[in-house]
Amino acid sequence: MADTKSQSSPILVILCAFGLLAFLVLVIYPNYRNMKDYDRQISALNGEIALRQALSPIYSKLVDQARLAPSALLKSPEKTALDIGNTGRLTLIFQNIANTAGLTLESVTPDAQTFDQGNGLLMVDVIFRGEFLNVQPLINTIVEQSFVDRVHKIQVRCAEDNKWIKLSVSLLHH
């Protein structure tokens, strides 16, 4: 009997050592690798935080400068609403605008749904024919009108035989 105990004892020690090694390889080493990855991510985030903290005063200064200096090119006339009687003259008004920009007016289409909403705005789709290079003077002239609230959408088609500019404009009316 003494022989079986002495023989099983080294086998148990080897089995325990193998189990301990397996535990280290299967449980502790993957956690160690994850911890290393987390440490790398934490150090990268700390570097990014330090960079943002260093750039924050510069960014704030630039934002403040942008708020203080409005562009001299942006003209904002005092807004007045277009009378209901003048809405019938929209084609004539936009024809004059088109002439100043060197374009031809193709159509003016008011949106009846926005007229009925009662919020004081009338959406109008206006299509001009001509070179799209004239779009900037056209938009400047439209925005300078006292009854124009804003230009919502600009579409430009520049095909060889079909060049047009379509603007969706909201007008103030009462």
Image (cartoon, grey):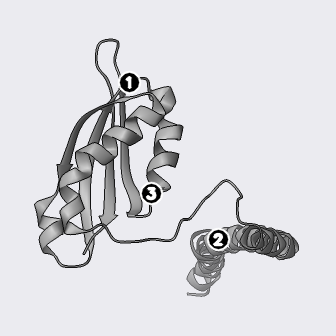
| Mark 3 lies on residue | 145
Quadrant that contains the C terminus = bottom left
Task: Name the spot of residue 113 as percent of width and height, x first.
Answer: 12, 65
* Label 2 or label 1, whichever comes before in sequence order: 2
Q: Looking at the picture, which amino acid does disc 2 mark? A: Asn
Of tags 2 and 1, the one toward the viewer is 1
SS at badge 2: helix
Task: Name the spot of residue 60 as percent of width and height, x first.
Answer: 79, 75
Q: Residues within 10 Å of mark 1 (few under 14, many from 20)?
A: many
Residue 73's place in the image compared with 42, above or below, is above
Of tags 3 and 1, the one toward the viewer is 3
Quadrant that contains the N terminus = bottom right
The residue lying at 32 percent from left, 47 percent from top is: 93
* Label 3 or label 1, whichever comes before in sequence order: 1
Task: Name the spot of residue 2 as percent of width and height, x first.
Answer: 61, 87
SS at badge 1: loop
Q: Looking at the picture, which amino acid does disc 3 mark? A: Gln
| Mark 2 lies on residue | 34
Q: Residues within 10 Å of mark 2 (few under 14, many from 20)?
A: few
Q: CA distance from mark 2 to mark 3?
A: 64 Å
Q: Looking at the picture, which amino acid does disc 1 mark? A: Gly
Left or right side of 47 for 22: left
Residue 69's place in the image compared with 169, above or below, is below
* Label 2 or label 3, whichever comes before in sequence order: 2
Residue 149's place in the image compared with 151, above or below, is below
SS at badge 3: loop
Q: Are marks 2 and 3 in contact (CB under 8 Å)?
A: no
Left or right side of 107 for 138: right
Q: CA distance from mark 3 to mark 1?
A: 21 Å
The residue lying at 67 percent from left, 53 percent from top is: 73
The residue lying at 24 percent from left, 60 percent from top is: 86
| Mark 1 lies on residue | 130
